[in-house]
Amino acid sequence: MSETPLLQVKNLHTSFFTDAGEVKAVNGISYNLDAGRVLGIVGESGSGKSVSAYSIMRILTDTGRVTEGEVLFKGENILNYTPQQMQKFRGSRISMIFQDPMTCLNPTFTIGSQLKEAIRIHTNRTKEEIEARAVEMLQLVGVNEPERRLRQYPHEHSGGMRQRVMIAMALACEPDILIADEPTTALDVTIQAQILELMQSLQKKMGMAIIMITHDLGVIADMCDEIIVMYGGKVCERGTADEIFYNPRHEYTKGLIRSIPRISEKHEKLVPIGGSPVDLLNLPKGCAFAARCDHAMKICLEQPPEEVEVNDCHIAACWNNVRRMMEEQKGGEEA
Amino acid sequence: MSDYNPNIPPKKRPFPFSMQLDPSKFEPASDEEKAQQDVMRESTTFFRDGMRKLFRNPLAVASMIVLIIILITIIIAPLIVPYSYSGMITVNGKRDKSAKNMPPFTYSKLEQQAIDEGQHVFPHIFGTDELCRDYFIRVIYGARVSLAVGFFASLIVLFIGLLYGSIAGYAGGKTDLIMMRIVDIIYSLPDTLMVILLSVVLDQLLGQSLQGTVLASIGPNMLSMFAVFGLLYWVGMARLVRGQILTIKNNEYVLAARAMGASRGRIIRKHILPNCMGVIIISTALQIPSAIFTESFLSFIGLGVQAPMPSLGSLANAARQAMQAYPYKMVFPAVGICLIVLSFNLLGDGLRDAFDPKLRK
Amino acid sequence: MSEQKHLVEVRNLKKYFPIKSGMMNKTVLKAVDDVSFTIDEGETLGLVGESGCGKTTVGRTLLHLYTPTAGEVYFDGKQVTEKNIGEFRKDMQIVFQDPYSSLNPRMTVADIIGEPLDIHKLYANKQERADKINELLTLVGLNSEHANRYAHEFSGGQRQRIGIARALAVNPRFIVCDEPVSALDVSIQAQIINTFEDLQQKLGIAYLFIAHDLLVVQHMSRRIAVMYLGRVVEIGPARDIINSPIHPYSESLISAIPMPDPETARHKNRIILEGDVPSPLRMPKGCPFRTRCRYATKECEESRPALREISPGRFVACHHR
């Protein structure tokens, strides 16, 4: 019996209509997220990973719009929700935490009032219950002296502390999905380790699904059950962590992995990906990565690659996989 | 690495592709084919990019057109229209006292006679005023004065404000502190009061010595207005310039210039000032209508240019007194002021939208 | 024993910033508090630490972009002072972190790279200047048709190359690299790292490579210095520091690195530090790390540990190691 996945993103397209033209930030991504799983979305700037999350939460800026596709949460298309329905939905069924803890909390309100606001909007509790729940959430995220902290202002706290408060706000209503958009990029490495550890333990305790968006392959390697690699607004590859790291089937993924410095006895020179990131105003008609790809073929320049199942838990959108399949078939036929 | 074994062969599947795939397409692509995709966008400087944006703004373009038309008109009109702004209309050499307060495009009795005799009399496009002078040419000269005042006053503001602000911004520390406190004090002085006081003082001081010079036609009132602008209105520009310099000073390219061994002068010339220019030009463009409006206001209350030199404000004042009898006379100078001030404001806004780097992205 | 001459030597460098807190009070921000290290010709010393540790300030103070509060800087044996820093500007250069604010938006690439040539009059005529600029562009992986464009037309990685070309224009023997790849995407970082390495091989330039990404630093550096709250807590060969860190802070820093490898990540034994970094305005007495240290004792509160050489080339500032 297959359950309906918790979240289904189907052929999502998002564009920004600017002075300079249409910026095609997301160009047809599809994935499913099951309850309680951790999905990592990895990509560099301009890959569309953050924009796809903003599209799901429907918090795109004025010039942005979802131009095609569906986002099904428990079977319902949330892109069709009215603003009132979205308001009830955001923060209680799907929550989001952002990158820069310095600017994500309102500096003119105390931490307590912001945390309680999140609780108040989505639940029907009395003032005492809300206060108790706020204290409970702060304790859950590892903030000591929670009662005192509630009355303090964001600027009195460090980045790590503010990020914990953000996590508390996001989880206050026990959402089904937590979207984390580069939550530790702006934090120091030791604080990052604390926050990641916290997120993992909370995930085990509360059982929510997490979508972890980041550019850091190290962060992804440890935390995620499944990983999506994005480039130029498209999914390059989707698979389990082991599959992506040890059996990459897209040239971009391979390039990324080769270009990360590692700890090794010999000094191995890095193999960077040549060229510059693709221009989202002028997307090529073929594969977005073709111009930078060492294994590009003629077809890569003409047609965007289709997704190929590499195995049960791994999908890649690269014509080289098709070439390999064709060669195998030929080999099979000749045998 | 790990003991992970990725070589589980994929299950045999039927070829999943709906369309026929051409095997020749699976040849490697050459570097030239790939390079075709990598086109650098055409080179634009900051200036060209901004101008492009400016010309896409319909209000800004309309304002520019209006201003150009006004400019052309006030340059050409005195060459075409044979009347002067200060003298009564003359017919056959004799002053025509019957040509008082005529509505547009009418002729006085004497002029009608002259036309019947075969003379060509240039029409009075706006009619005449209470002193039998052609109104149209007076409005034209009024516009000239207003624009000239706006322009020169803004230049004074620019010059003093730029100098003061640059010194305060670059020097920093105590110098900056003292200079800015002086700015604060000047800011709090009431400008209209100062103008009135200054014009009285200057009138007495300069009244005698100015006679016979070019400046006499402008009048001490005008001069006092310039003096006030020079003394009071530069503070806004100074603050703006100082703020810009403080921001730019902290940019890393200034630090890089220091690390190369660039002298202070070079840093100011090549790094700081060019990056301020955009904001300064915009501010000056917006200063012009403000100056024109101030001048119009002062002329309206009688403190502006000396008669007979007209200014749009003084014309409006004169027309106000005759509102009951000849309401149309107010229309021309008022519309003139509105057009000029509005156009400059819209142009300044358009410039800011196009060039202000803070608003870009 | 012959004293090996170091290219760059920093002794007891201090940089304090006066901060106004409140009406009358003036506290001092001790951004750099007694830092010493050496760099040899053609060598890369990596300088790591988290935000607020003072590593960027060290780089800038070394070049006298900030006036040192105390301490000495020596270049090739000669002492660098406020008065004679001008002579050293051709030998010591800097590359900045942010490729967007380190290039003047009103200047063409040719002018940006040519400015050091102009200041130090390193050419005889216009043609020579143009040739030198083209040479520099090619050296960093750009080409001559880029010379007449403006900085904002380039991507982050390309701008960083322009910054490197600018630093190379005067033929420096030493470059302070202040987080040069932190603002770049991962795939571009690798390009720029390779560029730095190639230039070092070709031209023999020494680097002070300041960064917070330990994987990048250990890749590039022969030796690493770890900083915490304005002080150096450990210096040694890069391999040793990464594989067997001695100072408790280095230990936790290295164990916190997210490894891009699922197997390693799963089996990692993370040492998670409690609490946050104390504010540099209110530094703990004695050893600054003791508030988060597992091994802290009374002694750590009373006195500040000095940097001791515990084995040749390996220095640690801790009472207990």
Image (cartoon, helix red, strand yellow):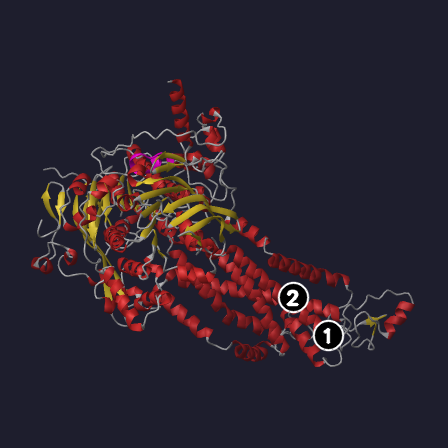
Q: Residue furthest right?
A: B117
Whether callout 1 and callout 2 share a subunit is answered yes
Q: Amino acid at mark 2?
A: Leu
The quarter of the picture where the C terminus of chain A appears is: top left
Q: Nearer the viewer, residue A107 or C197?
A: A107
Which mark, by number, is residue A173? none
Q: Residue furthest front?
A: A1
Reply above or below: A190 against A332.
below
- Helix, strand or loop under label 1: helix
Residues A269 and C92: in front is A269
Residue ID for mark 2: B339
**Residue A31: quadrant of the picture:** top left
Residue C251 lies in the magenta-colored region: no
CA neighbours of label 2 inside 10 A, class few (<14), some (14 to 19), many (20+):
some
Left or right: B354, with C253 as reference point: right
Question: Where residue C198 appears, x then y in whole percent?
Answer: 31, 34
Span shown in magenta = A245-256
Q: Is residue A27 above or below residue B197?
A: above
Chain letter of the residue carrying label 2:
B
Query: Which subunit holds the residue at mark 1?
Result: B
In space, the residues marked 1 and 2 are separated at their CA atoms by 16 Å
Q: Position of residue C90 (x, y in %)?
A: 32, 43
* Residue A128 sits above or below residue A266 on the image: below
Q: What is the tally of numbered marks visible in this picture?
A: 2
Image coordinates of residue C224 in percent, x first then y, are 20, 43
Determine whether, in the image, residue B117 is placed left or right of residue C150.
right
Residue located beneath label 1 in the image: B329
Look at the numbered discs 1 and 2 and tell me whether their residues touch, using CB distance below 8 Å: no
Q: Which comes sooner in the sequence, label 1 or label 2?
A: 1
Q: Nearer the viewer, residue A8 or A201?
A: A8
